[in-house]
Image (tube, rainbow, N blue to C red):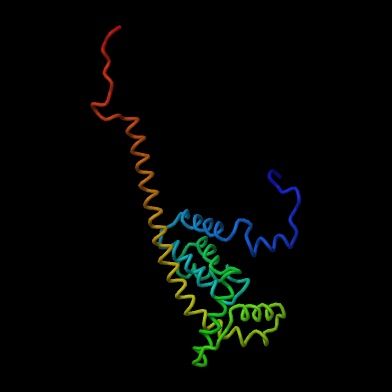
Amino acid sequence: MLFRRRNRPTRIERLRVAVWPRNSWARSTRYFGKRVLRLTATPHAIALGFAAGAFASCTPLVGFHFLTAFALAYLVRGNMIAAALGTSVGNPLTFPFIWAFTFKIGQWIIHGRAPKADPHQVHQQFQQGLFEKSLDALWPMLKPMFIGAVPLGLIVGTVSYVVVYKSVEVYQRRRRNKLADKGAGKHGRLFPAPGNTVEEDGSA
């Protein structure tokens, strides 16, 4: 195959790239942003899909964020590709803070008080429970995280909808105007306006 790497990356390298992109998070964020803007759908559908993905990324359903995003996007009639891109809101940089916030909000809703929770400590405890695959060990954390994910997901989803809707609307409007200007220029070259033609002098 053309352009295939001569030395195949190891599993550790593939895992590192999945957790930390080669071209930095800033460049990856710009890439995802362009992908969202260039989707072929209405701004409302794209924004709804992205909001569904953002909401799904706030849940503790690690490994099922794509399926959750697709299900939500289907229910609200959002764009499926935008939903997949919206799950990028949840990434190794934001997960510790998302899980800590959902845990604290859930504890506050259940018990009426929010305990002090260090994001990295909650992250480590949650990951440890996932690796142990013990529901008994996970449930004390999962229950408040599921409950806290709803209000946090609604906030993140709403903000994402507004930002994406406005961005896509502006991008599509500029693109339409650019195509219209290009079409008008091409039309003007094919059919010159009266008075702009060069008259022949009739000399042989």
Q: Residue 16 location in percent, x, y? A: 68, 63
Q: Residue reaching furthest bottom?
A: 111
Tell me if 7 is positioned left or right of 25 in this view: right
Where is residue 61? Give x, y as percent: 60, 75
**Quarter residue 46 falls in:** bottom left
Point 75% across, 53% down: residue: 8
Please name the residue shown 53% across and 62% down the image.
85
Q: Nearer the viewer, residue 176 or 89?
A: 89
Q: Position of residue 79 (x, y in %)?
A: 48, 62
Quadrant of residue 167 in the image? bottom left
Q: Nearer the viewer, residue 25 or 197?
A: 25
Query: In screen coordinates, is 59 left or right of 179?
Result: right
Name above or below for residue 102 compared with residue 28.
below
Quick check: 162 above or below 155? Answer: above
Residue at image point 42% right, 64% down: 163
Q: Position of residue 45 (x, y in %)?
A: 43, 62
Name the outermost residue toward the top: 204
The residue drawn where x is 70% and y is 60% is 14
Count up the numbered dots.
0
**Which quadrant: the C terminus?**
top left
Location of the N terminus by quadrant is top right
